[in-house]
Image (cartoon, rainbow, N blue to C red):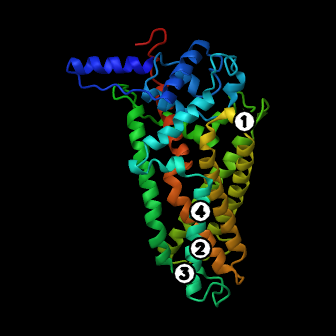
Amino acid sequence: MQQLEALTREAASLATGGRTVIPILTANETEVARQMQICNACRYCEGFCAVFPAMTRRLEFGMADIHFLANLCHNCGACLHACQYAPPHEFAVNVPKAMAEVRGQTYVDYAWPPALGKLYQRNGLTLSLAVAAGLALFLIMAVAMNGTLWGGNLQGNFYKLFPHNLLVSLFAPVFLFAAVALAMGVRRFWRDVTPATSGAPLSAPAAAEATDAVLRLKYLDGGHGQGCNNEDDAYTLSRRRYHHFTFYGFMLCFAATALATVYHYVFGWIAPYDLPSLPKLLGVAGGLSLMVGTAGLWRLNRRRHPLHGDVAQKPMDLGFIALLFLTSATGLALWLGRGTPALAVLLCLHLGAVMALFATLPYGKFGHGVFRTASLLRHAIEKRQPNPIGLGAD
C-alpha cells in the first residue's frame, strides 16, 4: 500500500510539473516503516536504545528516516524479547531482524564506487579466507623463488625479505583506497539522512555525546545496564565486552603501526622493535585483545538466535571476524618466531592476512561501525532540537 501511495504521489508531482521524485520503498524498508508505526503507538521499549527516542520524533517514516534508524540500531535483541507483538503474534514485530535487513542494503547502496557495492553480499567467510590465503601464497612463492623461504641469514630482520619501501608501495594504496571508499560512502549517507531544512548544526556537546556512545558501546547494555540477549532470554554483557576487546585491540594495533611510522621517518629508528619499546607494547597488547575479542564474537555469533538479525549477513560477519583474528594471531606468531627459521613463512602469512583485511575493509562488516557512528552523531544533534511533534513544538 505504501508503495502504491508513493507511486501516486510521484505521478501527481510529475503531472503538475514538479521536479521532486519521491523514493519508493523496498519491501524491507516498508517492513521497517510498518513496525515503527506499531512501536510508535506502543512505546514500551522507549528507554532501550537510541532507536526508540528517535522514532518518537516522527509520525511517518520515509527512506532517509528508515536508513537512519536502521544504522542507529545496535542489533542487541533486547526489544525483541520484551515485545508483546513479537512472533508468533500476528503483528510479527521483530525490530532487530527488520533493521538488520535494511542496514545490510544500505551498505550496498552507499558503497563507493557503487559498482563494488555487491561485494557486501559476497564478502563471506569463504571469500575472506580465500583472499588471505591467496595473497599469502603469492608472497610465499615470491620468497621461495629467491631461496629464502626457510632459514637464511635474516637475523630476525624481515626487511631483508621485503624492503621497507616495497611494503609501503604495497600497503599504502590499499589503505588509502579503503579510507577514501569509506569516507565517500558515509559522506553520501550523512547527506541523505540529514535534511537540509533541519537547521540543526553540529555542536561540541553533540559530538562529545556521540563519541561517548561509540567508545563505551552504550547501547549494547540493553537500556538497563544488564546487557542484551544472544541465544535466549537471558541478559548478557558478553557482546559488549567482546566488542570492546575487538575495537580497542584494533585501535592499539593501529596506534602501534602509526607510532612505528613516526619512529621510522622522524627519528630514523628502523624496525623491528623489541620490548619494551612502545610500538611493541601497543602491538602485543592490541594483538592479544583482538584475539580475545574476535574469538568471543565468533562464539556468540555462531550461537545467536536466528530471529536476532539477518541470517544472510552471517557469512559477512564471520568473514570479518576471521580476518581480524588471523591478522592478530599471525602478527603475534611473527613476533614470537622472529628468531626462528620460520620467519619468512610467518611474515608472508601475516602480510597476506593484513592485506586481505584492508582490501575487503570498505565492503565488509567494518562498515557498520562507520555508518553507526554517523547515525549516533545525527541522533545527538537531532535530540537537541525542539521535538517537531511534541506539545509546544514549532
Instruction: Find the distance from the CA under tag 1 to the CA under tag 2.
Output: 37 Å
Q: Which residue does the numbered mark 1 point to in the structure image?
A: 305
Residue type beneath disc 3 = Ala
**Regarding mark 3 in the picture, which secondary structure is present there?**
helix
Q: Are marks 2 and 3 in contact (CB under 8 Å)?
A: no
Which sits in the foreground, 91 or 254? 91
Which sits in the foreground, 300 or 337? 300
Q: Residue furthest right?
A: 234
- Whether residue 322 is visible to the viewer of this picture, yes or no, is yes
| Category of crowding for the residue at label 4, using alpha-carbon neighbours closer than 10 angstroms: few (below 14), some (14–19), many (at least 20) | few
Q: Quadrant of the N terminus?
A: top left
Residue type beneath disc 4 = Ala
Q: How many marks?
A: 4
Disc 2 or 3, which lies upstream in sequence? 2
Position above or below: 363 against 39: below
Q: Which residue does the numbered mark 4 point to in the structure image?
A: 130
Residue type beneath disc 1 = His
